[in-house]
Image (cartoon, rainbow, N blue to C red):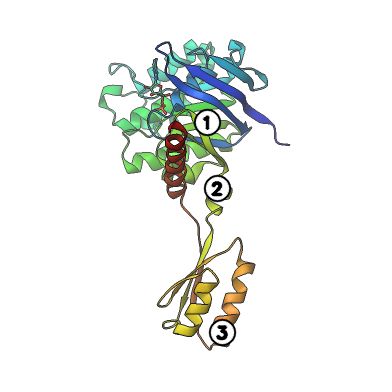
Amino acid sequence: MAEVAVEIEYLRKRYSGGFEALKGVSLSVPKGSVFGLLGPNGAGKSTLIKSLLTIIRPTECRGTLLGRKIGDRKTLAQVGYLPEHAKFPDYLTGQEVIGYSAGMAGVARATAKERTKRLLALVGMAEWGDRKIGTYSKGMKQRVGLAQALVNEPEVVFLDEPTNGVDPEGRIEIRKIIEAMKAEGRTVFVNSHLLAEVEQVADQVAILSNGNVIRSGSVEALTGAGLQYELRTQGPVPLDLRQKLEAAGLQVAGDRLLIPAKDAAEVQGVIDALRTAGIVIRELKESRQSLEELFLSAVNSAREMAKGGAK
Ligand code: ADP
């Protein structure tokens, strides 16, 4: 079995006002992977990260972070963190921000200097390190935020909504930086409500809604559950054959067929039937449900169940 970086067996958080933000969450993050915790605003994503990092005290918690009990502060030396809405003083330069974080993490001065240089290059800010934060775009600020999260060479990095407020070009940059972190062997835990983005970078995801994990697994397995094949023919499918195909569960509209199937082998019978009828096939492609579609249907069905339960 792959080694795990984060193993949450059970996590519950009730805030002092009585609001239960996490209702008994379990999840597991393999070492060296990119993990996406997805969910709408208010789902409990930040509460989960803050619980792991001892920023808030969970009501009930069983599990480990890098093999030690969650809540053990010794582990934090091996952890990096970019909080949501991180704000650095406008009057500091990018390299001063990273140097400051290095100091806080107890990194020796000479090492910090060398590391700051390397990290600025990693996040594509080598030429901007001596300019003040106040002159940066939102995307550049976030890149410095990502760099400061790496000053202690952490094994796990927690990023809370790293692309919030960043323009599309900046988001691509951030995605590349996350990929670079993974290539260096780090585990990256990303909170996001931007599914399409996480889909491109995460190996595993969990969907959090209303304090509960409602789906989890590899992006491929989750989106593959709604797998279908789209087939295009030369000209429309004749009526009698169309009726037969529809009776077998296919959707046929003119020259376009949608075939629900787990793999390409299941599609071969349809191809045979079409070919026997003398129909020319123009195109065949796999079409997966996007993470966004999966997310919306999962969140909606969780809401429906909650409504049903409330009756
Ligand atoms: P997310 O990160 O998914 O947007 P949060 O973890 O920030 O969600 O918040 C989850 C829920 O907990 C929200 O309804 C939020 O209002 C509530 N919450 C967050 N912090 C506190 C707090 N300190 N006291 C009471 N409720 C809180």
Dot 1: element:
strand
Marked residue nearer the N-terminal end (2 or 1) = 1
Dot 2: element:
helix
Mark 1: few/some/many CA within 10 Å (<14, 14-19, 20+): many
Q: Tell me where residue 67 appears, x and y as whole percent.
A: 68, 21
Marker disc for residue 275: 3
Say whether residue 39 is left or right of residue 169: right
Q: Amino acid at mark 2?
A: Leu
Closer to the eye: label 1 or 3: 3
Judging by the rendered image, the residue that carries numbered circle 2 is 222
The response on whether ligand 1 sits within 8 Å of label 1 is no
Q: Tell me where residue 82 appears, x and y as whole percent.
A: 44, 24
Quadrant of picture, ligand 1: top left
Residue at image coords 45%, 20%: 20
Locate the N terminus and report the quarter of the image it occupies: top right
The response on whether ligand 1 sits within 8 Å of label 2 is no
Marked residue nearer the N-terminal end (1 or 3) = 1
Q: Amino acid at mark 3?
A: Arg
For the residues labelled 2 and 1, say whether their Cβ atoms are less than 8 Å apart: no
Q: Tell me where residue 69 appears, x and y as whole percent.
A: 65, 16
